[in-house]
Amino acid sequence: MMIDGIELGGDMMIIALGITNHGEKVILDFVHAATENHRPIKAMLMRIKERGFKVGSGFLVVIDGSKGIHKAVWNHFQNKRSFNVAYGTNSKT
């Protein structure tokens, strides 16, 4: 899973993407928020779970350095046995 936010008109659009076994990206959910605060991201992760998203072994979440995204991901997945977080970089041109 990849989670990231993009600023649009002064607000944030936060998107969660899944990646299939064939490498295809699938939008799992998104949320419009004022900032990358952990509360709307936590709610987004709960909606994804309620729709039947299953976490298998070796589950990886890729995020940037956002403290809000990190907190939401950690709080939501911390009890999973094979939960890993990878930090990507945000390169702007």
Image (cartoon, rainbow, N blue to C red):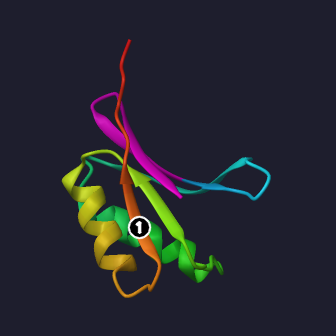
Q: Is residue 61 above or below residue 6?
A: below
The three-letter amino acid code for the residue at tag 1 is Asn
Q: How far from the left and from the top, in percent, is residue 51?
A: 64, 78
Write the residue at 62% across / 80% down: 54
Write the residue at 29% across / 77% down: 75
> Counting other residues with Cα less than 10 Å from the Cα at mark 1, is it few (<14), some (14-19), or many (20 or more)?
some
Furthest residue in direction top, as rendered = 93
Left or right of residue 8, residue 18 in this image: right
Write the residue at 38% across / 41% down: 88
Left or right of residue 7, residue 18 in this image: right
Furthest residue in direction right, as rendered = 22
Element at label 1: strand
Q: Which residues are magenta?
A: 1-16
Q: Nearer the viewer, residue 11 or 74?
A: 74
Write the residue at 33% across / 81% down: 78
Q: Which residue is mark 1?
A: 84
Q: How far from the left and from the top, in percent, is residue 57?
A: 58, 79
